[in-house]
Amino acid sequence: MRVVRNIGANEYIFSWFSGIRRLALIYESLNIVFDRMLIIFSLIIYGGKSVNELGNKLNTKSKNRILFIGPIPEEVGGPRNGGVATYCWELAHQANKNGYNVYIWSDAAYSFNDEDISIISWNFNNKLKLFFFGVIYYLMSIKILKKLEFLTFKQKIIIAYRAYLLKDLIKIVNPDIIHVLHLLDNINFSLFCLRSPPPVVVTEHAVGLVYEYQFCNKYDLRNNQGSRSLINAVLKKTDCIISVSKFSQKSFLKNFSIPNNLITKYILNPIDISKLPILNKNDEKKKLGLDKKKVVAFIGVHLPIERKGLDILLETFLIDDYLRNNCLLLIITNDEARIYASKFIKSNKIDGLALGPQPWDKLIGYFNSSDVFVMPSRLEGIGLVYYEALLAGVPIVGFHSSVKELEEVLGIYIGERFNAALESKIDLAEKIKKVLNTDFDRNLLRKRTIDNLSWEVKFPEFDSVYKKLVIGSTEI
């Protein structure tokens, strides 16, 4: 008599799941050639001549190869502008100028070459391919990825898919160094899935402060403790963390568990001095129709209200008669904040102008028209916009730690420090008025910025990190 066994639904699903996982492991062990050819094919399709140039660069053994992973600015093919995108693009070009073979793996719309730099797009247009290989790599890395409790299943699949792409990109490029431009980029979790990647450098942009000031929800870090634990785990796979300021590094070391072999260093964000000239303030004001009053400028597109304190500045104008009567409030921000600011300005009859994101040639004019740059941030690393204001000879009222560190580096008074956690809108108004009524040497502000924060001055610090990691040194 034959006994027929009834298989329950749960057992059937488990059996199917186990079978798929075994297939994934077989796939990994065989290392199918087609897997790698997909990357090469995408380079041929999207990069044009990039594959030939990629081959020529790989044949150049005398140069160290570095793979940067991060966003690039909108004007060169990226989806959006921002400080991290500018940082990535300018750092890559400085590395190229200083003798490195440079590759950028980015969210650009397509792959292309710029000078001798290969920009390689992680193109997600093929959703079927993303899902298929994402699921396979998810199953292969499930012990790691299931710990990402604060991410959705879709985000985990994308992380797994990028791990799949990155594994083969590393085989093709064979980089001596990988530099991820932001610790909160999920690519760090993709790297965590790989076995024995080359030395990894990661830049952290005030991540410790995000936890210290309870801003986790603004960065999709909803599970505070869980995300902190996972970042601690990522640090074990990282060789060097670069903080964008001294106070940012201090907060990072305080909030995370630093492995004994992890190198930590701070390098102030450098600035491309050629992109923002100093111009005649009166001429620029007349061109833009801003010549009637003193101009108080706020320029910031990333979390302008939640993080950078645009709401604090608007309410400060509301309560202070001097600012209302003698100043024009110039706001350049993202479209959502622009709508909010425009309504506030109109309903409260403030003399102000709220604009959305502007092309760079117009931003040069707006910077040079400003009498003071104000960013009363609740949280800040040291944003590039501070440097841009100083290049235009514009003094600052800003995040207390940022202004303090910049003054220490530049060796001069550049404006006033504001602590949103401890000071009031009345305090902010007084600081703005103090700066407006102080006679600053615009050329000196610019000169000290160039002398201390230009790429020519700061890149050797990055170069030292890269070269020492290549030879395996832990003394940086």
Image: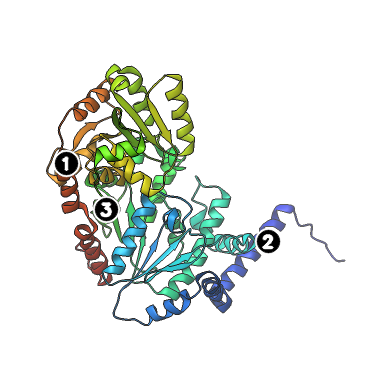
Residue on which disc 1 sits: 407
Judged left or right of residue 64, residue 55 is: right
User: In this picture, is 15 found above or below 299?
Assistant: below
User: In this picture, is 431 found above or below 234?
Assistant: above
Report how far apart the C-alphas of labels 3 and 2 lie in the structure: 57 Å
**Rendered residue at 48%/58% (across/down):** 107
Disc 1 marks a residue whose amino acid type is Glu
Front residue (pair 218, 236): 218
Q: Secondary structure at mark 1?
A: helix
Report how far apart the C-alphas of labels 2 and 1 lie in the structure: 64 Å
Q: Secondary structure at mark 3?
A: loop
Q: Residue furthest right?
A: 1
Q: Residues within 10 Å of mark 2 (few under 14, many from 20)?
A: few
**Rendered residue at 35%/34% (across/down):** 289
Residue on which disc 3 sits: 271
Q: Quadrant of the C terminus?
A: bottom left
Q: Secondary structure at mark 2?
A: helix
Mark in front: 3 vs 2: 3
Mark in front: 2 vs 1: 1
Residue on which disc 2 sits: 15
Residue 440 screen position, x and y as percent: 15, 36
Disc 3 marks a residue whose amino acid type is Ile
Front residue (pair 401, 211): 401
Q: Quadrant of the N terminus?
A: bottom right
Say whether marks 3 and 1 touch (CB < 8 Å): no
Residue 417 screen position, x and y as percent: 22, 33
Splitting the image into 4 quarters, where does residue 11 fall? bottom right
